[in-house]
Amino acid sequence: MTTAPAAAPLVSRTVPLTDPGPLLSLLPRSGPVAWLRRGEGLVGWGEALRVETTGPDRFAVAERAWRDLVSHAVVRDEVGLPGTGPVAFGSFAFSPRSAAGGVLVVPKVVVGRRGDRFWLTTVGAGAVVPTAELRLPTWADAAAAPEEGHGGVRFVDGARPPQDWARQVAGAIGEIAAGRLEKVVLARDVTAVCDRPVDPRTVLTRLADRYPGCWSFSIDGLLGATPEMLVRREKGLVTSRVLAGTIRRTGDDARDLALAARLARSSKDLEEHEYAVRSVADALAPHCTSTNVPESPFVLHLANVMHLATDVTGVLADGTSSLGLAAALHPSAAVCGTPTAEAAQLIDAVEGMDRDRYAGPVGWMDAEGDGEWGIALRCARVDDADPRRLRLFAGCGIVAGSDPAAELAESDAKLLPMRQALTDA
């Protein structure tokens, strides 16, 4: 299903803006949209239009709708950077069979920052609120200010209790040992129940403060801080950051350095990482004139874990949009497995849940097709029917050398960012 705007074309105006302060401070409580890293990025509010899709063609249908909309749009852009002009924010389900489908949301107002440049974009159908007269809201406004918070939080098991999930991991290791596949990523969920409805701004602020190197996002009730850039397209350059292979941090710097060295030498983690890098490079190759894949990964240090990481780059050859590239890359071995079809079949058989939009592409795209799409990791989805409830997700790459207990511990580490963002621990 696709929901489009009225017959009148979109009209968009972008103007330079003086420093408005922290972008997250501008957001209202209801329906905030955000994509931020180290204070830079985009925030928005209001809804000029949305496009909803389902099924195997969810990416293609959304992209066609967006291209049609911008081809008829009236755009006045006085800044001219990626992310100016009309911008669509999106998130898409991991599985084509998920009822969560996909969505593109075009906010009525977007504020962006890149370096020391700031801008303001307004979007409407047939008319635009005069930008010069638009007042930027802040949390100091009585109507927008956070109230008493969401109160206490309790966590309950999701589709599978922890030990049951570990048994499924053991079964997957058996499938790999039998030669049926090389790697599979198994995920689990946990439900958070709050005393009062969650204020997304509070969660986003905590995530952005604790994980500044990640991309903090809020799109259609999906909140998180992902360390993994599925694909960025900017002026012909394509970049993808691959993460696979994880170890939990201890908080002791000397010990963490030793653990990082161990991670970099781990045959199990290097094998898992190699599958993920190979799948990304193979998916990008048809769209790029050249692709650069470093010979060995580096260790990415985050607040809670360390990952093996590789940045794959290429030069765009065919004009494919950032969303089109994300569709070509999804699902990578980092969130599904190798071979893809066999891994997806095993996921369906043993996870016992709908991943919803967890591990699917999440990000934004502008009218030129440039944009950034991360993988929806370290995230939670707010329940549409009950805003006090959220589903938290975490997944682990399973290969021949995996250990079920260690994978369970790794999944707990990956759930930690959202747990802490909800409890302020």
Image (cartoon, grey):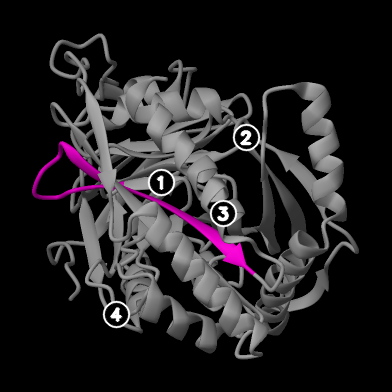
Which residue occupies 26% across, 57% down?
A: 10
Q: Is residue 373 left or right of residue 50?
A: right
> Which of the two discs, 2 and 3, sits closer to the camera?
3
Whether tag 1 and tag 4 are in contact, CB under 8 A, the answer is: no
- Verify whether residue 390 appears in magenta: yes
Residue 368 lies, in percent from the top left, at 51, 61
Whether tag 2 and tag 4 are in contact, CB under 8 A, the answer is: no
Name which quarter of the figure residue 115 lies in.
top right
Start-end of magenta stretch? 381-398
Q: Secondary structure at mark 3?
A: helix
The quarter of the rendered structure image containing the N terminus is: bottom left
Q: Secondary structure at mark 1?
A: strand
Q: Residues within 10 Å of mark 3 (few under 14, many from 20)?
A: some
> Which of the two discs, 2 and 4, sits closer to the camera?
4
Q: Can you tell which mark lies on residue 213?
A: 2
Q: Nearer the viewer, residue 21 or 184?
A: 184
Q: Nearer the viewer, residue 333 or 121?
A: 333
Q: Nearer the viewer, residue 39 or 282?
A: 282
Q: Can you tell which mark lies on residue 97?
A: 4
Mark 3 to mark 4 CA distance (whole Å): 30 Å
Mark 1 to mark 4 CA distance (whole Å): 20 Å
Which residue occupies 71% across, 81% down?
A: 282
Whether tag 1 and tag 2 are in contact, CB under 8 A, the answer is: no
Name which quarter of the figure residue 389 lies in.
top left
Q: Can you tell which mark lies on residue 379?
A: 1
Indicate which disc, 2 or 3, sits on the residue closer to the N terminus. 2
Which residue occupies 76% across, 64% down?
A: 268
Residue placed under numbered mark 3 in the picture: 405
Mark 2 to mark 3 CA distance (whole Å): 29 Å
Indicate which disc, 3 or 4, sits on the residue closer to the N terminus. 4
